[in-house]
Structures are given as C-alpha cells and as structure tokens.
Image (cartoon, rainbow, N blue to C red):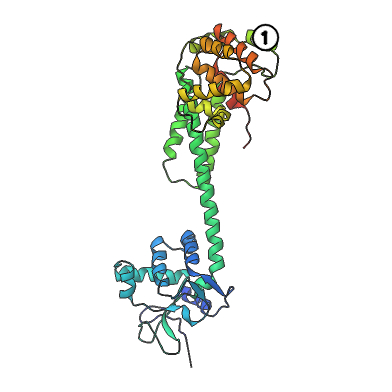
C-alpha cells in the first residue's frame, strides 16, 4: 500500500501551515500542465505576496531545475529529491544552514511540499514513489501566481509612469523658475523652496500614494509659475490692424522690461522650454534640436513653407535678433492653423520689437499656458 506523508521528519513539529497546505497534495489540478519557468518568473514578480524573498525564489528555481523538462504535469514525477549538498552546489555553494532556512520558507509559503522518508533521506523507489520536495503546488497555484504577478506588474508600470511625470514636472518647473528668477519676477521665492524640497524627496523610494501627491504638488507649482510669468496678448487670428491695436494696448511697464530683454541675442529662456511650448518645429529636422544654432537652421528651413518672404525674415533678424526670430517662427508654426497671413504677422512682430513691445519669451509662456491634449 502506497502512502505519501506530508508531516515533517525528526524534531520538526507539525504546524498550522503544514495542515493548511496538505490539501495541495491531493487537490485537483485546475490546469493539466504549466511551463515551470513561466510560473517561476511570475512568482519572482509576486514574491512579496507570498512572503518570499528573492533568494527564496532562487532556491526554488534551483530545486525546479532537478525536474526533468520544462513542463509540470500532474503525477508522481513532480517530486524532486536532491540532497542538500547537491542543491547547495547548484546554488554556487550556499551554506546548508542558509539553504534549510530558505527551504523552510518555501514550504511555509505553500509553493512546495515536503515528503519526508522514514529516515529523513531523499530518494526514489522503484515504481515511481519518491521522497523529497513536491512541486505540485506550483501547478495547483499557477493561476493565482499569474494573477498576483500581473497585479504587481501593473503597479510597477504605474509607479514608473508616475515617477516619470513627476521628473518631467520638476524639470519644467525648475527651468521656468530659473527664467523667472533671472528676469526678477516677483512671488517666486517660496515656489523655489517648495521645488527644492520635492527634488530631495524624489531621491527616496516612494510608493504610489506618495508619487501621486508629488504629481499634484509639482503640477500646482507649474500652474503658480505660469500665473507669475508675463502674458502674450496678441490675437493671431485677427488682421494686421487688429494686431497693431493689441500692440498699442500693451502694458507700458511690460514694454520697458521686454525692451531690455529684446536687446539681448542670448536668452535666459531655456531652449528646452521653447521646444516644449512649440514641439511642432522638431518634426522638420531628422536630427534633434540641441542648441540655438539648430533652432535657427530649422526655422530657416520652415520659413518658406509658411509663406514668409526672405526680406521679411531678414527684417525680423535685424529688429528682434536671430534667436528671437527663430522662437517667434516656432511659436507661429504651432498656431499656423489660426494665423491667416504669417508674413504680415511676423512683420508686425518685428515692428513691435523695434519699439521694444515684443517678447519672444512671452509668446513661449503663452503657449505653455494653453491646454494641450494628453
């Protein structure tokens, strides 16, 4: 008469865990077979759900390697019986005391069963009976393990996505803050302190709830910075005379500050911020736009596509500077669908620049404040 024992040999006592997992030795298998390596990959993803460490799973993988083939099929062939010495060698010399601890953790987690012989040795008898470690729980619990692994993968993906969003928010806010500080805008000091605190927090290992809170906070800082930045008040869909009226109605104090900025050929405004506000222009070059020279080159390429004549382009360079002209054209490209006459529009901007009433930076900030599709 054949009897498979699930009670431990020697001084090891029967525990509630043993009794709980005994049913796994006789429960019907929900599937006829599974890929053992696929189950082990899933278990590695979901190990925390089963109270296992990465080294526990490594020991289980070594134990599963003594099973012939890659498919676990229900039957007596699921019991493996390597000695501790042999198993330790396959684990690159893991000490036996450490090995026994990991095997006990696997049994406690219910991913293997221990079938001890009368003398505690592991071996197989003629007729197929064997004493050792039973891998049948991996077959019985394969679907449960797969579900837990997918849940963990989804959570990990959401964690990566949230962290990426927070990193992008911090980068945008940092560059906007740098521009605001360089241009002596008020009410930004407190935002800088809050931003520095969030950047320190991001160095830690954060959970979903913490990252979600950081996402909301960084979004709030960006919105507050956008409110503090100057606004562009032109109406690109109107005619040239309407544009001129907008120019004349601009706040005089803003004109004075912008006039000083327009005299500069280099910009405190970061190139990355320009490309974030006006990303369309990057589609007209096979290589990334890495510096102002690249932006000027691509703007010159796009200029005739917008119907802007060479003399208008030359005039914009002379009156607003090459960099500001390139920024203006990139912003105009974003609004190409609503600017009826790009050449006339650029000419009007050049006239504003001549009188100190134009700011390429304000055009960029106006685009950044516009709602964008996700």
* Residue lying furthest bottom: 1
Kindly identify which residue carries mark 1: 245
Answer left or right for 336 relative to 319: right
Can residue 20 be seen here? The reply is: no
Please give the name of the residue rendered at 38% of the width and 87% of the height, measured from the top-left corner.
118
Which image quadrant: the C terminus? top right
From the viewer's perspective, is 153 left or right of 125? right
Seen in the picture, residue 107 relative to 172 is either above or below; the reply is: below
Considering only vertical position in the picture, is 339 above or below 166? above
Q: Position of residue 310 (x, y in %)?
A: 57, 14
The residue lying at 58 percent from left, 20 percent from top is 303
Q: Position of residue 81 (x, y in %)?
A: 39, 79
| Of residues 258 and 113, the one drawn nearer to the viewer in this rendering | 258
- For the view shown, which residue lies furthest in the top direction? 355
Give x and y (percent) for residue 112. Answer: 46, 73
> Where is residue 117, by image quadrant?
bottom left
- Name above or below for residue 201 compared with residue 153: above
Identify the secondary structure beneath mark 1: helix
Residue 219 visible to the viewer? yes
Name the foreground residue: 269 vs 340. Answer: 340
């Amino acid at each position: 008469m054949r009897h498979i024992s699930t009670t431990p040999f020697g001084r090891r006592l029967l525990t509630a865990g043993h009794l709980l997992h005994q049913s796994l030795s006789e429960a019907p298998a929900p599937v006829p077979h599974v890929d053992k390596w696929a189950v082990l990959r899933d278990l590695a993803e979901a190990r925390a759900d089963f109270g296992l460490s990465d080294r526990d799973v490594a020991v289980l993988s070594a134990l599963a390697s003594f099973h012939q083939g890659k498919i676990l099929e229900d039957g007596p062939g699921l019991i493996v019986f390597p000695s501790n010495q042999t198993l330790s060698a396959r684990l690159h010399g893991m000490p036996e005391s450490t090995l026994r601890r990991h095997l006990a953790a696997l049994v406690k987690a219910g991913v293997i069963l221990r079938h001890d012989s009368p003398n505690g040795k592991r071996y197989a008898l003629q007729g197929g009976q064997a004493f050792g470690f039973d891998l049948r729980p991996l077959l019985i619990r394969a679907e449960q393990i797969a579900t837990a692994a997918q849940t963990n993968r989804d959570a990990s993906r959401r964690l990566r996505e949230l962290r990426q969003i927070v990193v992008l928010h911090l980068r945008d806010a940092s560059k906007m803050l740098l521009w605001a500080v360089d241009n002596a805008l008020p009410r930004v000091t407190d935002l800088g302190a809050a931003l520095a605190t969030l950047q320190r927090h991001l160095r830690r290992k954060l959970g979903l709830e913490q990252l979600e809170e950081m996402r909301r906070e960084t979004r709030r800082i960006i919105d507050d910075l956008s409110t503090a930045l100057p606004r562009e008040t032109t109406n690109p869909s109107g005619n040239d005379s309407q544009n001129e009226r907008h120019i004349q109605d601009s706040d005089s104090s803003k004109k004075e500050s912008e006039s000083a900025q327009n005299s500069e050929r280099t910009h405190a405004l970061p190139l990355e911020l320009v490309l974030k506000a006006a990303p369309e222009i990057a589609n007209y070059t096979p290589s990334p736009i890495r510096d102002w020279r690249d932006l000027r080159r691509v703007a010159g390429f796009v200029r005739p596509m917008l119907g802007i004549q060479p003399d208008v382009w030359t005039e914009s360079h002379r009156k607003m500077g090459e960099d500001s002209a390139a920024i203006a054209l990139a912003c105009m490209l974003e609004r190409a669908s609503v600017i009826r006459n790009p050449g006339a529009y650029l000419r009007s901007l050049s006239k504003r620049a001549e009188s100190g009433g134009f700011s390429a930076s304000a055009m960029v900030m106006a685009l950044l404040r516009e709602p964008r599709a996700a």
